[in-house]
Image (spheres, coloured by chain):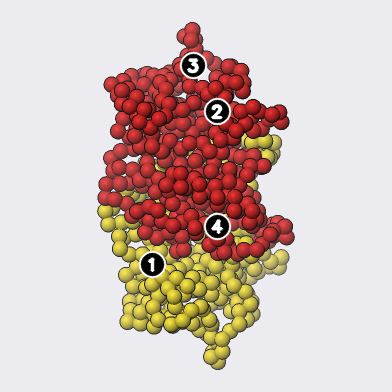
Chain colours: A yellow, B red
Amino acid sequence: MIVPENKEKSQFTLDEFGLIKKYFAPLAKPNSAHVDISLGDDCSVFAFANDERLAVSVDTLVTGVHFPEQALPHQIATRAIAVSLSDLAAMGARPCGITIALTMPVIDNDWLEGFSRGLAQSLAHYAVPLVGGDTTCGPLCISVQVMGALPKDQALTRSGAKPGDLVFVSGTLGDGAAALACLSSAHRCLEKDYFEDKFYRPVARIALGQALLAVANAGIDISDGLLADAGHIANSSSVAIELREESLPLSLAAKSHTSAKTLQQWALTGGDDYELCFCVSPERQEQVQKISESLDVRLTKVGDVRSGEGVHCIDSSGQIIKIKTGGYQHFS
Amino acid sequence: MIVPENKEKSQFTLDEFGLIKKYFAPLAKPNSAHVDISLGDDCSVFAFANDERLAVSVDTLVTGVHFPEQALPHQIATRAIAVSLSDLAAMGARPCGITIALTMPVIDNDWLEGFSRGLAQSLAHYAVPLVGGDTTCGPLCISVQVMGALPKDQALTRSGAKPGDLVFVSGTLGDGAAALACLSSAHRCLEKDYFEDKFYRPVARIALGQALLAVANAGIDISDGLLADAGHIANSSSVAIELREESLPLSLAAKSHTSAKTLQQWALTGGDDYELCFCVSPERQEQVQKISESLDVRLTKVGDVRSGEGVHCIDSSGQIIKIKTGGYQHFS
């Protein structure tokens, strides 16, 4: 009863300890001053500076739900890491360690080689060490927990937006939904490379999040769609947010992939963009411009914070746009 | 393609935000001075005292692998929390926060009510707050990450055992394997209540681990079986460990459930006991006795640390016992 269901199908050539030693221990070399004890004991142990706090978040990716079943193992790894780190970015935290709970149906050395290769690329890109994890047997499912450091009295929360603030987003919106449509399509998609990159290697806006700590009043990452995520800021801050449809930053690839109407919908409710949405006082607009230049990241003003509640989007004629659906919700 | 496979079977009455609000937010009331920001933002944020470090561990439980498919939701919750906290105990850390990545096939309100009830009981028992998590749709799978605080220069690692040290274990051994046999059996098991408790509510030895920080040279929790886990200490400490078969502490329930020979095997290789195995210098034996009395926990000397490598077990006639199999490994 308590055995792997599909044990007979497995290619068991390594035990769990061998598997960790071969594929994961090489990624756990502490490359962070924070980590005192890494893989190989009951816990990993971190030290924080006196003026730092710990920020923690966890995200799970399930095969067939959060990535297509035919996704390659290195693609799954790079997506899992970026999606999880995006929450640290949204808080303004500096990544200092990652744990991975990996559940997989069989020990497939080719799969593990690809997965650990993708993992190594992402960990190097974000300069964050793997500090622990668990490997279990079951349907493919990856939980990544990220840990970051925050200055003692600073955090980019959802609750600090004030009426009069300007609302900005980084990058372009709608690419996540366009990527999903492109990768799911039976037809050939001209922008496949662009969208594959967007889907499997979204950029966690780590540097931007940290730069915004001293500038923004509130922030969030756009994982569920701009409307839904701006809604979280509005709720937490007890304000209203008014978005301007004509201001939404859109990529050329997304524009050429679909109609303007569909793309508007995707930009507002598609989710999976992993850009940051943040609110700043008008007198800090120049600082936002400077951050945009120094980090070479597109930052676009998309709306304003008002007194009131909820989020609405205004078209060029001043009409409120009716939106069909909310953002992505895992069970809807 | 990227939709829940069994969406049509679902009982979708709540969206993800509603689900978190109803079942999990009530458990997240900060009852720890550590937690600055809990559920409801992109990350949870912790503060640590200047003289503290963070200990982190993650464990995944998969249905049909780590618990029977007919396990009740409150049982799954209490087992998941105890198994995960056991790693903090093994490190001597004080629990200060838990995140849960819960993947489930459908939103079943009865199941969630039971799960959150078990969760609430365990969190209250160990006085640790839920600080974050993720809920996703897929085959039932629960990853629990535990975070604890450690004094700056102390940790109960696997690597400090010295030749001459005495080897102790807490509680009784073999109950985990006996519980599995009892719960898996088609026959009626007289000690079912005892074993159900052992399996679904193992005791994470949190207070013991903290007490041992100043006393023991090395420690580990027995999740893979005494031989395998003592082996981890032996490897990490570059020592040999000699265990005495006649000293292994066994419960009456386990003794009456199976033969002496089978129980010996279970005690050495069964795993799932979540007791602590630790090594202390002989001059500290009295302190161990005091800890046993003050915490009311059975602590039994089961062997000695020697120069050399590996673990072996000696029977009453001085012969080395041959052991059939190693401890539990997730993929063997």
User: How far is mark 2 from mark 3, CA to CA?
Assistant: 16 Å
Amino acid under disc 2:
Asp
Could you tell me if the residues under marks 2 and 1 are in contact, i.e. CB atoms within 8 Å? no
How packed mark 4 is, by other alpha carbons closer than 10 Å (few <14, some 14-19, many 20 or more), is some
Residue appearing at x 32%, y 64% in the figure: A154
Measured as percent of width and height from the top left, residue A24 is found at 48, 43
Foreground mark, 4 or 3, reads 4
Tell us which disc is closer to us: 1 or 3.
3
Tell me the kind of residue under disc 1: Leu
Of the residues tagged 2 and 1, which is closer to the observer? 2
The label shown at residue B23 is 4
Label 4 – label 3 distance at C-alpha: 47 Å
Pointer 3 local density, CA inside 10 Å: few below 14, some 14–19, many at least 20: many
Same chain, marks 2 and 3?
Answer: yes
Q: Where residue B301 appears, x then y in whole percent?
A: 40, 21
Identify the chain of the residue marked 1, using the numbered disc in the image: A
Which residue is situated farthest in the top direction here?
B317
Residue denoted by label 3: B245
- In the rendered image, residue A19, in percent from the top left (x then y), is placed at 53, 38
Quarter-wise, where is residue A211 in the image?
bottom left
Q: Is residue A214 left or right of residue A218?
A: left
Chain of the residue under the numbered disc 3 shown in the image? B
Residue A156 image label = 1
Callout 1: SS: loop
Q: Quadrant of the C terminus of chain A?
A: bottom right
- In percent of the image, x 71 and y 65: which residue is there? A186
Picture layout, residue A213 above or below residue A115: below
Q: Chain of mark 4?
A: B
Amino acid type, label 3: Glu
Q: Secondary structure at mark 4?
A: helix
